[in-house]
Image: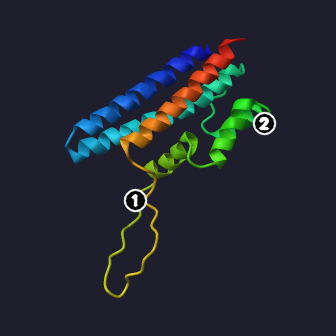
Amino acid sequence: MASQWHSLISQKVFLAKSLLNQRDRTDSIPEQEACWQGAVELALRSRQLLMVMIARLYQDKQGEPHNLESLKTLLGDDIPEVSELESMALGAGNWWAYFDQLQRYQTRPPSPKKTVSDENIIAVAADYGPERSSEALNRALADMKNFTDVLEERHSEW
């Protein structure tokens, strides 16, 4: 049963990477943005499906967790995968945290840009959101795919 979920996740990751390749080959700004947003949506869907896969691995046939908190509520605190994902969620510089940034970026309108004049020039650090390069998303997708593969292998040994 879990390998069906593993296959579905693998398919979404493959399609996201295909969109990123297409993004890098086009000169059209709208097409680049469409490919980027499509790849991000597939990545986020893959992450959500990963949580469903984990629930199925632990014999939960009904629950479909939509976030880490609902997965934790469904399965409890003592599941190793939940602990791994929680530690990634609290950290930075990993695929889970990057996907969190992408999700926030993708689901909120852009911040309004302030006009600059001689009277209001002040140097400040601005938050521009997550890195939007194809390489960054490809790395995160590869890391998530690796996590999923290890998870599938770990549970198929039983």
Could one spot residue 62 in this view of the protein?
A: no
Name the residue type under label 2: Asp
User: In this image, 59 relative to 95: left or right?
Assistant: right
Q: Residues within 10 Å of mark 2 (few under 14, many from 20)?
A: few
At which x and y percent is residue 132?
39, 48
Identify the residue at image location x=38%, y=84%: 120
Question: Tag 2, which secondary structure?
Answer: loop
Q: How many marks?
A: 2
Which mark is drawn over residue 77? 2
- Identify the mark at residue 90; answer none if there is no mark: none
Q: Say whether residue 42 is visible.
A: yes
Give x and y (percent) for residue 136.
43, 42
User: What residue appears at the point 51 percent right and 49 percent down from the top-left corner?
Assistant: 101
Quarter of the figure with the C terminus: top right
Residue under pointer 1: 110
Q: Is residue 17 above or below residue 89?
A: above
Q: Earlier in the sequence, mark 1 or mark 2?
A: 2
Going by the picture, which residue comes out furthest to the right? 78
- Does 12 sit above or below residue 114? above
Q: Is residue 71 left or right of residue 46?
A: right
